[in-house]
Image: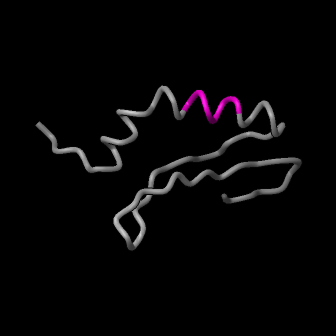
Amino acid sequence: MAVKTVCEMLEDKFEEDILAFLNNFQRENDCKIDHWSFNPDDSGNYNLQIQINKQDSKYLN
């Protein structure tokens, strides 16, 4: 059995809520999400990073 990383466990645990949030974000902001991920910071906290496309421009939030 493969051991999951903390990021994978967070994604699994909150996947339904995250996907609902991201879908709503796309609708409200008229954009397309290219990629999303959880990433740890230096303090041991995890941040949700989202890369979006809007009107032929790329943004990373």
State which quadrant residue 27 falls in.
top right
Quarter containing the N terminus:
top left
Residue lying at 65% horizontally and 45% vertically, measured from the top left: 34
Q: Is 21 above or below relative to 39?
A: above
Highlighted magenta segment, given as a residue range: 19-24
Q: Assess whether residue 20 is covered by the magenta stretch.
A: yes
Main SS category, magenta section? helix
For the point 82% across and 47% down, which residue is it? 54
Residue name at image x 26 percent, y 50 percent: 5
Query: In x, y percent, where is residue 43?
Result: 37, 70
In the rendered image, residue 52, in percent from the top left (x then y), is placed at 71, 49
Q: Is residue 3 left or right of residue 22?
A: left
Residue furthest to the bottom in view is 42
Scheme by which the image is coloured: one colour
Q: How many marks?
A: 0
Q: Say which quadrant the C terminus sits in.
A: bottom right
Place of residue 41 in the rendered image (x, y in percent of width and height, measured from the top left):
42, 68
Question: Which residue occupies the extreme left position in the image?
Answer: 1
